[in-house]
Image (cartoon, grey):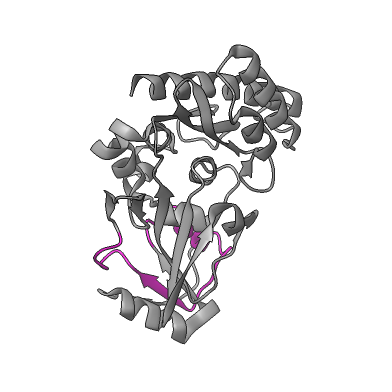
């Protein structure tokens, strides 16, 4: 099936892109990596009057650390994030997720902003950003705002972004002490959506867990933040018993469905196992940092 007809624009500045969005509003769609949008166009699930291609806009693919944040530009490709030297050395939860997303074509073309705005609950970045408590920066003509990732994700294909806004960057607060993370994902085959996934992030204070983050993939109508499990980890010394407790608390917020990828019971079992394994890996990384 071919997509319906649309006008096409390829602005070279962010201001021009935002002006086009302000003009066309809900009748426009942003083209970043195209790995979600192009299939939707071909299936006629989307039919914009205007397609705004932002691949020529400079400055949207930054990846750097400042004094307080890790900054990831919205146009950063999955593969760039997964293999960037800063990420591999200091942010294992991003490095592992970036290498597990879909297949090589999607990883090379797809962008973190495109994935987040598409908001598929089986996608990976939402869980990673929930674990690290990231802020999402969106801009429109005349202004910008910052939205916590937990408030940004609303439901299946639903987010807090407005039709005249572009997701320009992700800001991740840098931990003060040693930290570690992990992303574990079960998929039937390379390129498939997640059967289940768990993102883990910990910050240590000596031999105690100072902060913890847990994001869950494919366990509901959006990526889920296991807040009760996170609270149970804070201020505690790592142990298999503590990990098991956090795993049970994380599983309580899940609402998986029986489908061709497995039964709901099986998926909950995977989540419990992955939370425990992820915490062990994250703490070990932090202790060796």
Magenta stretch: includes residue 180 = no
Q: Quadrant of residue 78?
A: top left
Tell which of 91 and 122 is nearer to you: 91
Q: Is residue 199 above or below residue 76?
A: above
Residue at x 50% of width, y 74% of height:
48
What is the total number of numbered labels drawn onto the structure image? 0
Residue at x 55% of width, y 18% of height:
238
Is residue 49 something one can see in this rendering?
yes
**Is residue 196 shown left or right of residue 165?**
right
Q: Main secondary structure of the magenta part?
A: loop
Q: Position of residue 257 (x, y in %)?
A: 74, 36
Magenta stretch: includes residue 41 = yes
**Is residue 245 shown left or right of residue 54?**
right
Q: Position of residue 111 (x, y in %)?
A: 38, 52
Q: Is residue 244 above or below residue 9?
A: above
Magenta stretch bounds? 32-60
Q: Position of residue 232 (x, y in %)?
A: 66, 30
Taking the view exactly as shown, the residue that stands out farthest to the bottom is: 23
Tell which of 182 and 217 is nearer to you: 182
Q: Is residue 226 above or below residue 12?
A: above
**Is residue 179 shown left or right of residue 79?**
right
Q: Quadrant of the C terminus?
A: top left
Is residue 39 something one can see in this rendering?
no
Q: Position of residue 152 (x, y in %)?
A: 57, 58
Q: Is residue 107 above or below residue 197?
A: below
Residue at x 45% of width, y 67% of height:
138
């Amino acid at each position: 099936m071919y997509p319906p007809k649309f006008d096409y624009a390829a602005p070279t500045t962010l201001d021009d892109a935002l002006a086009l969005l302000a003009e066309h509003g809900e009748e426009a769609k942003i083209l970043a990596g195209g790995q979600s949008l192009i299939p939707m166009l071909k299936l006629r699930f989307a039919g914009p009057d205007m397609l705004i291609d932002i691949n020529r806009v400079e400055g949207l693919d930054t990846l750097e650390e400042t004094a307080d944040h890790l900054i990831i530009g919205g146009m950063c490709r999955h593969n760039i994030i997964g293999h960037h030297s800063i990420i591999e050395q200091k942010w294992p939860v991003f490095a592992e997720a970036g290498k597990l997303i879909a297949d090589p074509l999607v990883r090379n073309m797809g962008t973190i902003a495109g994935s987040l705005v598409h908001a598929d609950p089986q996608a990976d970045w939402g869980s990673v950003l929930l674990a690290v408590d990231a802020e999402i920066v969106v801009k429109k003509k005349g202004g910008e705002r910052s939205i916590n990732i937990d408030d940004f994700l609303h439901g299946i294909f639903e987010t807090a972004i407005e039709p005249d806004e572009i997701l320009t960057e992700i800001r991740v607060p840098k931990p003060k002490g040693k930290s570690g993370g992990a992303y574990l994902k079960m998929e039937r085959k390379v390129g498939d959506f997640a059967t289940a996934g768990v993102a883990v992030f910990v910050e240590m204070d000596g031999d105690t867990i100072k902060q913890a983050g847990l994001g869950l993939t494919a366990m509901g109508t959006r990526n889920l933040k296991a807040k009760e499990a996170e609270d149970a980890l804070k201020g505690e010394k790592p142990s298999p018993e503590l990990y098991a407790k956090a795993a049970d608390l994380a599983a309580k917020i899940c609402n998986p469905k029986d489908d061709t990828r497995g039964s709901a019971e099986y998926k909950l079992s995977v989540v419990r196992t992955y939370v425990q394994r992820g915490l062990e890996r994250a703490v070990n990384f932090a202790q060796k940092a």
